[in-house]
Image: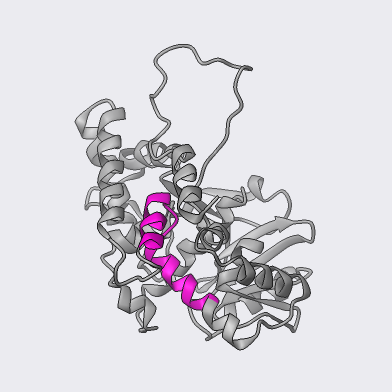
Amino acid sequence: MNQKSHIKLYALVVCYGVKINRFNSSFPVGKIRMEYMYPMNFEEFLMATGKEMLLNKIKQCYSKMEAMPSFAHEQAITLYKQYLCVGGMPESINNFIENDLDILKYDSNIISNIIEMYIADMKKYVKGNVESVKIEKVYKNIPSQLAKDKKAFRYNLIDEDGRKRKYETPIEWLISSGMILPSYKIKKSEIPLKVYKDEDAFKLYLSDVGLLTSISEIKYPDIMLERSFEFKGAITENYIAQELTFKNTSLYYWTYGRNAEVDFIVYNEDGIIPIEVKSSNNVKSTSLNIYIKENKPKYAIRISTKNFGYENNIKSVPLYAAFLI
């Protein structure tokens, strides 16, 4: 199967719509199997764009925690930045392939149209115009929420009269639809993480980083040319949230005092592991050091543009290899 047919086949099975109020009749319990489809992650992006050899090298270096060759590392970083622009929607990736992987030729209107279809879907499957307006306001407000230094969701940033009772249902609707990804603060770093999550302290990410780039009106040169801007951290964090969700990993984060915060906390075969996310090669992190001192994990993970490595009990994982975590 060639690259284009692979994308088109994938597009047939990915659900763009939402699952709320779609069934007006009885649900056939026990007769179907539920499958959750997500936007294509970076691994699938590499496969779709014909980068299988690079993909295999990434996997090999991750398993051994050894550095990628410089040329391969730079190639993978470039593809990662292109993915931030294109995102994981099959139609979007298909257009990128049809334009010979040239981001300057890529049709950015595709993602804009997907966002418009999402909003139209909200209005179609929500009873009452007032509720659909609230849902749209929450969705479009997420980039502003992520732009804050402390990204915990604040209702009063949606409007001056923003309160939990006003926007709780719209947020639940968006989470249930899969259009946004919630990450909850944990009260303590112990298993099982789920029972220690704080329902009232959470962050919200968009389901696809390409949608975030588009809805935030980011220009592609800002990403591709390594221009420094504060919101790049939010884009990177959203990308990691998307990759972890693709692996069916629940999203949690940890705070300590007023300023310390670790972006993601995961539970795997090695126990509870902290993950710090950096958008560049500046890997200084007081928060991660505090977490390690307080909780003594088996190891920690730092994701950045730096190559693979292992030092001071911290695994350095390049941003393009986040799908392997």
Q: Residue furthest front?
A: 1
Q: Is residue 144 above or below residue 113?
A: below
Within the magenta stretch, is there residue 99?
A: no
Q: Is residue 167 above or below residue 84?
A: above
- Residue lying at 44% horizontally and 43% vertically, measured from the top left: 11
Q: Main secondary structure of the magenta part?
A: helix
Quadrant of res 172: top left
Q: What is the tally of numbered marks visible in this picture?
A: 0
Can you give x and y, in whole percent of width and height, for residue 88 in the image? 45, 55
The quadrant in which the C terminus is found is: bottom right
Can you give x and y, in whole percent of width and height, for residue 250 in the image? 60, 50
Q: Is residue 237 above or below residue 132?
A: below
Within the magenta stretch, is there residue 81?
A: yes
- Residue lying at 40% horizontally and 68% vertically, measured from the top left: 101
Is 261 placed left or right of 61 in the picture?
left
Quadrant of res 302: bottom right
Q: Is residue 174 above or below residue 295?
A: above
46 and 298: which one is in front?
A: 46
- Residue lying at 28% horizontally and 59% vertically, measured from the top left: 215
Q: Is residue 251 visible?
A: no
6 and 249: which one is in front?
A: 6
Colouring of the image: one colour
321 and 49: which one is in front?
A: 49
- The residue segment tinted magenta is 76-98
Can you give x and y, in whole percent of width and height, for residue 220 in the image? 31, 73
- Residue lying at 71% horizontally and 48% vertically, measured from the top left: 192
Is 92 placed left or right of 181 in the picture?
left
268 and 272: which one is in front?
A: 268
Can you give x and y, in whole percent of width and height, for residue 256 in the image? 58, 69
Q: Is residue 154 visible?
A: yes
